[in-house]
Amino acid sequence: MWSVLWAAVRSKAPYVTFPVAFVVGLVGYHLEWLLRGDPPPAAEDEKSISEQREERKLQEIAGKDLTKVVSLKDKLEFAPRAVLNRNRPEKS
């Protein structure tokens, strides 16, 4: 008798599990919506990473005088010390 009962349960399992999974998903979706509150802003309203970077750079250089730069004659090294320091004689 048990084998007949288990065979019936196995054959009808998709018809039982789909509605149960659907209800659980629906309840979970609405519960999450209630807990989170307002949805996040649309993707169109958000700025891209490159736009945020450009705005940050513009804000950083807003107060600086860009005409005052170090002369190339005043610079002793044109490459980082760690890269080419191995074969160069020390400058005095």
Image (cartoon, rainbow, N blue to C red):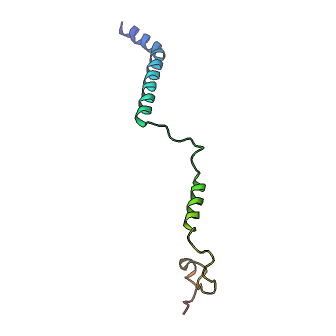
- Residue 48 lies, in percent from the top left, at 59, 51
- Residue 26 lies, in percent from the top left, at 46, 25
Which is nearer the eye, 11 or 16?
Answer: 16
Left or right of residue 13, residue 68 in this image: right
- Residue 25 lies, in percent from the top left, at 45, 26
Which is nearer the eye, 60 or 28?
Answer: 60
Residue at the (60%, 55%) spot, across then down: 51
Residue located farthest toward the left when viewing the structure as drawn: 2
Residue located farthest toward the front when viewing the structure as drawn: 63
Q: State the image quarter where residue 7 is shown.
A: top left
Residue at the (44%, 21%) spot, across then down: 23
- Residue 34 lies, in percent from the top left, at 42, 32
Which is nearer the eye, 10 or 34?
Answer: 34
Question: Is 53 located above or below residue 46 in the figure?
Answer: below
Which is nearer the eye, 21 or 8?
Answer: 21
Residue at the (62%, 83%) spot, across then down: 71
| The C terminus, quarter of image | bottom right
Left or right of residue 17, residue 73 in this image: right
Q: State the image quarter where residue 27 is shown.
A: top left
Q: Count how many numbered circles sit on residues in the image.
A: 0
Residue located farthest toward the top when viewing the structure as drawn: 1
Question: Is 57 located above or below residue 22 in the figure?
Answer: below
Residue located farthest toward the bottom when viewing the structure as drawn: 92
Q: State the image quarter where residue 76 is shown.
A: bottom right
| The N terminus, quarter of image | top left
Question: Is 60 located above or below residue 50 in the figure?
Answer: below
Left or right of residue 20, residue 78 in this image: right
Question: Is 40 located above or below residue 9 in the figure?
Answer: below
